[in-house]
């Protein structure tokens, strides 16, 4: 189970406030990383998403020290980072919130009709998959250990076939 995650943002405060709206939670400064904010779900697990300035990195600490905020770096426009989060909002409310921001917001089906998500492209650079209540039911029906094992086995078999064919 993921309790918290961090993501890059051009405007960490604004992105944290957006995510907090999806959760009916709240946003606040995140004191452990300079100029960062956090979206707090307000749930029993203490779920938060930290939003860090997009031009900063996390670096390993030294000796007994934990991670350290790193110096500014050249930010990428896009990355492979994404996450799926739940919301109590309706799909229409999620679309309206994304469109209000001017961010690409679109419903998509994952896999071979495994489950649906609403892709919200935060700041039009970073994807968050938002799952409404009905989408959460679909996801949880698909996302079982047995299904993931079968999914992985099929991918491995496909890769082995491609390797032998080459």
Image: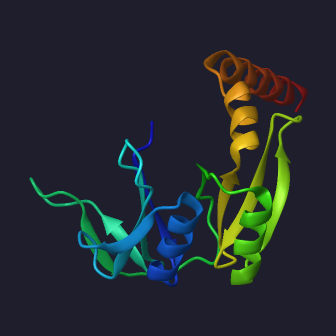
Indicate the quadrant containing the C terminus: top left, top right, bottom left or bottom right: top right
- The answer to which quarter of the image holds residue 111 is top right
Most foreground residue, 114 or 39: 39
Give the colouring mode of the picture: rainbow
- The answer to which quarter of the image holds residue 161 is top right
- The answer to which quarter of the image holds residue 36 is bottom left
Residue 47 position in % (x across, y down): 41, 50
Left or right: residue 36 versus residue 156 is left
Q: Residue at x 81, y 34 (%)?
A: 114
Q: Residue at x 75, y 42 (%)?
A: 135
Please determine whether, in this image, residue 5 is positioned above or below residue 71.
above
Residue furthest to the left = 64
Left or right: residue 56 versus residue 69 is right
Q: Residue at x 37, y 42 (%)?
A: 44
Indicate the quadrant containing the N terminus: top left, top right, bottom left or bottom right: top left
Left or right: residue 79 versus residue 7 is right
Q: Residue at x 41, y 71 (%)?
A: 27
Most foreground residue, 40 or 145: 40
Please determine whether, in this image, residue 122 is positioned above or below residue 131.
below
């Amino acid at each position: 189970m993921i309790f918290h995650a961090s993501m890059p943002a051009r405007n960490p405060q604004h992105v944290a406030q957006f995510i907090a709206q999806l959760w009916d939670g709240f946003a606040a400064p995140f004191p452990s990383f300079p100029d960062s904010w956090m979206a707090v779900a307000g749930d029993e697990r203490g779920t938060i998403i930290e939003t860090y300035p997009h031009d900063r990195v996390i670096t390993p600490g030294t000796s007994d020290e934990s991670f350290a905020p790193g110096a500014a770096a050249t930010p990428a426009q896009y990355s492979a980072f994404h996450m799926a989060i739940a919301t109590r909002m309706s799909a229409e409310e999620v679309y309206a919130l994304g469109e209000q921001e001017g961010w690409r917001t679109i419903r998509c089906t994952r896999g071979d009709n495994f489950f649906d998500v609403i892709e919200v492209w935060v700041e039009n650079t970073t994807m968050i998959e938002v799952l409404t209540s009905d989408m959460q039911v679909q996801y949880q029906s698909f996302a079982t250990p047995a299904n993931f094992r079968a999914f992985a086995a099929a991918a491995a078999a496909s890769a082995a076939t491609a390797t032998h064919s080459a």
